Each structure stands twice: as structure tokens, then as C-alpha cells.
Image: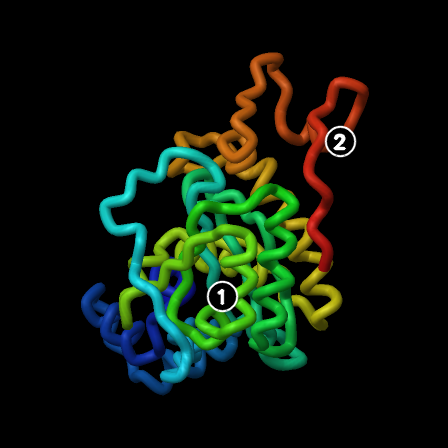
């Protein structure tokens, strides 16, 4: 029963699980719940550390996506950072997602949250073109001079979330949940190198193979490249190669 509750509500701690068991008619001491969770190696998912630390000296921009009709690729990209806990310590995943198609255009997995990693992920994205708008939170990585100059040089308009409004960047927030549940929490990578290799495989899968419910079970690449294959071939077939295969953009580096 504890295992079932954890699968449904992975953010429940042992006291909430004790309460949920009570509501199901099972009276048990919270210490026993905690002990059984340890035996089952169940770990509660807690709120992540705040990776968005603003700098008052940096320039901030208005939120440009309010009531904006986003109806084509490379119209809006969203960028953010999340933390991943490995056995060797914390690492940080930077990623840029195309808002319309959910296609991941650039990413970087690093030991630190420095602005250079965000710039590297953005430059990877430029292999696919440049967006009209790039939206980010007000963290120092996305409000500093280097980031702003990079976007301005590529004629990208800068958009920032409202303070404390994670919904303003909901596309990337949902991607964090997906990548953690479908990859990191299952693979348990032992090192940063292993995690980068796994991420490279997962990003290829996510972009080109994974059906997306919100896209009517199309894949992000279907919408990003505007190529809905009509010859009964899957994106897997196209990636594998052959004289009629789709020529993809260069593979994202680690």
C-alpha cells in the first residue's frame, strides 16, 4: 500500500503517507511507515533548490508572451535551469525548448550554474535557426550582459517571467517533470559523463520518437520541421538513415 501511494503521490513524506493510510482504514505508527519506506528505498521528492537568483543590478525585461498567439516553430523559445541529484553531487541541466513544438533545440548538463553554460546551450539552438522571442526567468544567468548581448546580436527579443510566476514559462517547467520521471529517476546515473551520454540519447528520443499527448500524439520534430511523414515511416526510420532519410540538423554535443 505504501508503494502504491508513493507511485501516485511521490511528493508525500512518511507523515502524509501515514495519514493517507489512515483514511483508507489502516492505522499504523508513523515510525513504522518511515521504516518500511526505507526498506522499500522510497525517497520523497521535495521542492528543488531555487536556481533562479536575480541580480538587482541586471536589466530585466517585460513578459512578452501574454495573450500572444504562438503558432509556428522558432517563434518563441523558453530557457531555464533545473538541478539533478547524482550520486556524485548536484548537477544542473540547462535547456531551451521551442514553445510551439516542444522541440529541445539546445541543452547543457554541467556542474555549475554559470552563464556560459546557458550561452552554449543557446548557440546549439542556433543550428536550427533563431527565435523571434526567448523567454526566461529573472535569474542572473538570463539577465546578465553576456546573455542579453548574445540575444540582441541574433535579433532575438528578450522576455522575462513575472516575479514568482513559474506558469509564465510552463513549457520548460513541464519538460523538467518529464525528463526527470522518464530518465533521471529511472537511470540513476553514477557520474556526470554517464548522465551526459544518457541525456544525449533521451533528447534524441524526446525530439524525434516520443509521441506527445498535448501535440495530438505527434512528435516534437513533426511540428518543428513541419514534416508529417505520409509514407508509413516513423521518425525512427528517418533517423536510422538511408538514401530517402530526412537530413537532420547536427547532433547536439555534450
Residues packed near mark 2 inside 10 Å, few (<14), some (14 to 19) or many (20 plus): few
Image check: 207 left or right of 176? right
Which quarter of the picture shows residue 139?
bottom left
- Quarter assignment of residue 162: bottom left
The residue located at (56%, 70%) in the rendering is 146
Q: Nearer the viewer, mark 2 or mark 1?
A: 1
Q: Nearer the viewer, residue 60 or 212?
A: 60
- Residue 75, given in percent of the width and then of the height, sits at 43, 42
x, y percent for residue 208: 60, 37
Q: Nearer the viewer, residue 157 or 101?
A: 157
Residue in the foreground of this view, choosing between 61 and 90 = 61
- The percent coordinates of residue 225 (x first, y second) are 56, 31
Q: Residues within 10 Å of mark 1 (few under 14, many from 20)?
A: some
Which residue lies at the image location 61% right of the left edge and 78% below the top edge? Answer: 112
Disc ID at residue 240: 2
Give the residue drawn at x 49%, y 31%: 223
SS at badge 2 = helix
> Height in image: 102 above or below 14?
above
Q: Of all residues shown, which one is farthest toward the right?
A: 243
Q: Residue 147 location, x and y as percent? A: 53, 67
Q: Is residue 40 visible?
A: no
The disc, 2 or 1, on the residue closer to the chain's N-terminal end is 1
As measured in the structure, the alpha-carbon distance from the residue carrying label 2 to the one carrying label 1 is 38 Å
Which residue position holds label 1?
148
* Image quadrant in which the C terminus is located: bottom right
Amino acid at each position: 500500500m505504501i508503494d502504491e501511494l508513493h507511485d501516485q503521490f511521490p511528493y508525500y513524506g512518511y507523515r502524509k503517507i501515514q495519514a493517507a493510510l489512515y483514511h483508507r482504514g489502516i492505522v499504523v505508527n508513523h515510525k513504522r511507515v518511515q521504516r518500511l519506506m526505507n526498506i522499500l528505498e522510497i525517497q520523497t521528492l521535495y521542492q528543488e533548490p531555487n536556481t533562479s537568483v536575480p541580480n538587482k543590478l541586471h536589466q530585466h525585461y517585460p513578459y512578452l508572451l501574454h495573450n500572444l498567439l504562438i503558432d509556428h516553430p522558432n517563434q518563441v523559445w523558453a530557457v531555464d535551469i533545473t538541478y539533478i541529484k547524482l550520486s556524485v553531487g548536484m548537477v544542473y541541466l540547462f535547456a531551451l525548448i521551442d514553445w510551439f513544438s516542444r522541440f529541445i533545440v539546445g541543452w547543457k548538463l554541467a556542474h555549475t550554474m554559470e552563464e556560459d553554460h546557458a550561452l552554449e546551450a543557446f548557440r546549439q539552438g542556433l543550428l536550427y535557426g533563431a527565435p523571434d522571442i526567448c523567454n526566461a526567468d529573472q535569474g542572473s544567468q538570463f539577465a546578465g550582459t553576456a546573455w542579453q548581448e548574445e540575444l540582441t546580436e541574433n535579433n532575438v527579443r528578450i522576455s522575462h517571467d513575472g516575479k514568482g510566476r513559474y506558469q509564465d514559462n510552463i513549457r520548460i517547467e513541464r519538460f523538467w517533470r518529464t525528463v526527470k520521471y522518464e530518465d533521471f529517476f529511472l537511470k540513476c546515473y553514477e557520474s556526470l559523463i554517464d548522465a551526459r551520454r544518457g541525456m544525449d540519447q533521451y533528447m534524441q528520443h524526446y525530439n524525434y520518437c516520443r509521441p506527445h499527448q498535448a501535440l495530438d500524439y505527434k512528435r516534437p520534430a513533426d511540428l518543428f520541421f513541419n514534416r508529417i511523414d505520409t509514407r508509413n515511416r516513423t521518425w525512427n526510420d528517418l533517423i536510422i538513415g538511408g538514401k530517402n532519410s530526412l537530413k537532420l540538423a547536427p547532433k547536439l554535443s555534450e
